[in-house]
């Protein structure tokens, strides 16, 4: 990768436009590689500013039932970390600009081995969110990620107090992922009022862009999050649409990918028309 | 480079919660502040004489400690080798060793101002112990239990309900202990403000492996004194079953620096370690990260966690406590395994020869004793941790033996 990292470049461009980012999350290989690839290819055109790809893991401790089942479908369809990098490589052949962030758990990365960060960067990955590697364990992977030019995007939770904030932020690059609720993905939502309190608290300690995830489901919520912070991540709501369209055997129907992309379009449009709070 | 041997094996974990490369704090950020709070609260509590005295009072008058050290004479005679002692933690209130650490943890939860307790359980022993302590301390209790285990451990499910706990069957994955632990962690993330997660074994993020070990070490400390009183010397061999490894850590830890004391941890070999149905993570697994710590895990080549199998719900876990992983690597403890069938035979033999119906978990330890005691000289001393009683398992055993009840 040369020049400005894609994530920084994208957020800078959005800031110039005066709007926040829409960031869809989908699980790799859910429900099969082809459908998953079709959705991935269509996301930028549907309005995704950045893309988060979940790497399926058997024991996703921070995820609710929707993402758990997506991961199980992905694994059943043969998802591996190497296979996920393969999807990113294919995506990069057509799109050089949209940042890709892998989100997942540490064990598949550990199992992949020392080459992971270099391989991920070579495939076109821009950043990593590793749910179960907090700053306390950051030396596990951070040097390799930095050497490969990958951003380490860290989670900040409502439980992260001011003393920890500086510690977590010191280890963060790319953007900050604010977990809007104390809980797992796809369960409940935070109110705008709570977010309006939480985001300025983080801003006092960092100039990095802040995206809000966990419990962001509707176009209104996405627009709200992108206005209050710098981006909105929507995952479970998209995966629910996908899951609801599968046949009895759990296979995609001809229109499944398009249904998800239509929802992405609606969410992205809502984010695009809202001017960010100054 | 030759590293000097540490002068004690009882100094772990380090400040990062590591035993050698194992352990640590691999949890989501939401949990991290609370994990640090638990660590701080525990450090204060264990240096507070009032806290420790209250815990000891409960152990004496509520649990019934010290548990006896029983010379299993008939079994010793039959096997014809080393002298076999049982450390009888199956006589504890609630029927297993789990209550030792549960009482300590629930006292800690109270001290931290937590008002709700959650726990995971496999065989149901830890769930029953937690439900018991919650009844005693008047705290609401939710126990996550794999749906498969709910099915095969009905007596304990009913026991927990009688004690006032809510039992939540977990249907994800293979619906056993691993999945119950996932669900426990998910609930904790969602309820950090008022909830304490009472982990049942020497696994999970730091400080749990250390804290549970410390509380369970009462087993080894007593056994040491009792053996000195009975034989005037230390035992030659300690044997304990390993699922997560809390009863084994409790027995082994006080002896780790006694070079003359050998230690064998017995994993569940299920249908055999060369089949795909076993729970022998140290024997057949490799290091990885799950449930907050780095440790040996049963996993495929891509780092996906595999399902464990054992007739014993308490050993049916694809990981093991991180301190065991370290003791395995430095070869201080020898880890071996026993199959479902071997455990079933030991279960029956113990019932008939000693009048003690063991839980299926220590039946694995006993199966190993049966294998090695005959070839040991008669003056050698073995302590086996009889960590639980078998009442909960009679339906499982009956089914395995083709008996309808």
Image: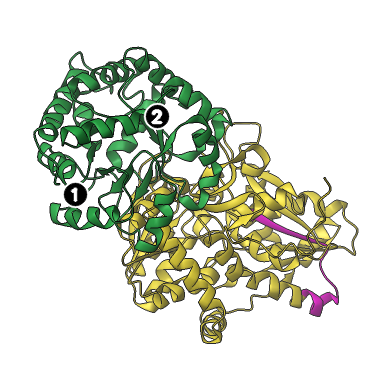
Chain colours: A green, B yellow
Q: Nearer the viewer, residue A43 or A26?
A: A43
**Mark nearer the N terminus (2 vs 1):** 2
Where is residue B140? Give x, y as percent: 32, 69
Tell me the residue at 40%/63% (across/down).
B34
Span of residues in magenta: B227-242
Look at 44% across and 64% down and name the residue there.
Answer: B198
Residue B347 vertical position relative to residue B256 in the rendered view, above or below:
above
Marks 2 and 1: which is nearer the front? 2
Q: Secondary structure at mark 1?
A: loop
Q: Nearer the viewer, residue B172 or B187?
A: B187
A99 relative to A175, above or below: above
Residue A38 disc label: none
The 10 Å Cα crowd at callout 2, few under 14, some 14 to 19, many 20 or more, is many
Observer-nearest of A238 and A166: A166
Residue B123 shown in magenta: no
Query: In this image, B235 relative to B188: left or right?
Result: right
The one nearer the camera, A30 or A182, is A182
- Could you tell me residue A162's position as x and y percent? 35, 62
Instruction: Chain letter for mark 2, please.
Output: A
Chain letter of the residue carrying label 1:
A
Q: How many marks?
A: 2
Observer able to see residue B287: yes
Residue at position x 43%, y 55% from top? A167
B340 is higher (above) or lower (below) than B127: above
Query: x and y percent of residue A207 in the render?
Result: 31, 47
Cα–Cα span, label 2 and label 1: 28 Å
Q: Quadrant of the N terminus of chain B?
A: top right
The residue that mark 1 highlights is A189
């Amino acid at each position: 990768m040369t020049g400005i990292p894609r994530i920084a470049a994208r957020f800078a461009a959005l800031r110039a436009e005066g709007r926040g980012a829409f960031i869809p999350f989908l699980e790799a290989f859910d429900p099969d590689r082809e459908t998953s690839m079709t959705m991935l290819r269509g996301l930028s055109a549907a309005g995704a500013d950045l893309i988060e790809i979940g790497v399926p893991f058997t024991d996703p401790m921070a995820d609710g039932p929707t993402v758990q089942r997506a991961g199980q479908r992905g694994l059943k369809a043969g998802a591996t970390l190497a296979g996920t990098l393969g999807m990113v490589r294919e995506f990069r052949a057509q799109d050089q600009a949209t940042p890709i962030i892998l989100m997942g758990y540490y064990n598949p990365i550990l199992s992949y081995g020392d080459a992971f960060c270099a391989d991920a960067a070579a495939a076109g990955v821009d950043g990593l969110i590793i749910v179960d590697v907090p700053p306390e364990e950051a030396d596990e992977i951070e040097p390799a990620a930095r050497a490969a030019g990958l951003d380490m995007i860290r989670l900040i939770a409502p439980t992260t107090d001011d003393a920890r904030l500086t510690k977590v932020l010191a280890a963060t690059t790319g953007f900050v992922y604010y977990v809007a609720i104390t809980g797992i993905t796809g369960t409940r939502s935070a109110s705008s009022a709570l977010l309006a309190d939480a985001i300025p608290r983080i801003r006092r300690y960092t100039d990095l862009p802040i995206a809000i995830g966990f419990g962001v489901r509707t176009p209104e919520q996405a627009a709200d999050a992108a206005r209050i912070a710098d981006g909105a991540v929507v995952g479970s709501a998209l995966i629910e649409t996908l899951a609801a369209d599968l046949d009895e055997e759990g296979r995609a129907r001809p229109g499944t990918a398009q249904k998800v992309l239509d929802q992405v379009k609606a969410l992205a449009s809502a984010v695009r028309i809202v001017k960010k709070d100054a | 480079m030759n590293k000097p041997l540490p002068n004690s094996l009882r100094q772990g974990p380090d400040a990062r919660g590591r035993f050698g490369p194992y352990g640590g704090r691999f949890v989501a950020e939401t949990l991290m502040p609370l994990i640090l709070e638990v660590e701080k609260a525990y450090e204060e509590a264990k240096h507070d004489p009032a806290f420790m005295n209250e815990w000891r009072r409960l152990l004496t008058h509520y649990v019934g400690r010290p548990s006896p050290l029983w010379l299993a004479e008939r079994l010793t005679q039959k096997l014809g080798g080393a002298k076999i002692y049982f450390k009888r933690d199956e006589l504890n209130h609630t029927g297993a060793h789990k209550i030792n650490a549960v009482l300590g943890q629930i006292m800690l939860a109270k001290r931290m101002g937590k008002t709700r307790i959650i726990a995971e359980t496999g065989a149901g022993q830890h769930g029953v112990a937690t439900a018991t302590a919650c009844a005693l301390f008047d705290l609401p209790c939710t126990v996550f239990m794999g749906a498969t285990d709910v099915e095969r451990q009905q007596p304990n499910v009913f026991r927990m309900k009688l004690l006032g706990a809510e039992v939540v069957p977990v249907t994800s994955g293979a619906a056993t202990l691993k999945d119950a632990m996932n669900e426990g962690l998910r609930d904790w993330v969602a309820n950090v403000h008022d909830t304490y997660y009472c982990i049942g074994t020497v696994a999970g993020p730091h400080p749990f492996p250390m804290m549970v070990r410390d509380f369970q070490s009462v087993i080894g400390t007593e056994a040491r004194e009792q053996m000195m009183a009975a034989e005037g010397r230390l035992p030659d061999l300690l044997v304990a079953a390993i699922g997560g490894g809390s009863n084994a850590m409790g027995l082994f830890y006080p002896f780790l620096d006694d070079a003359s004391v050998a230690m064998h941890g017995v994993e569940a070999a299920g249908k055999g370690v060369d089949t795909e149905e076993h729970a022998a993570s140290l024997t057949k697994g490799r290091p990885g990260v799950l449930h907050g710590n780095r440790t040996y895990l049963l996993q495929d080549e891509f780092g996906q966690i595999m399902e464990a199998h054992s007739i014993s719900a308490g050993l049916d876990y694809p990981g093991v406590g991180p301190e065991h992983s370290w003791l395995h690597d430095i070869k201080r403890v020898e880890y071996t395994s026993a199959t479902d069938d071997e455990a079933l035979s030991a279960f029956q033999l113990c019932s008939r020869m000693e009048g003690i119906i063991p839980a299926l978990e220590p039946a694995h330890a006993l199966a190993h004793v049966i294998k090695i005691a005959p070839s040991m000289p008669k003056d050698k001393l073995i302590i086996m941790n009889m960590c639980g009683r078998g009442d909960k398992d009679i339906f499982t055993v009956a089914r395995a033996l083709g008996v309808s009840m």
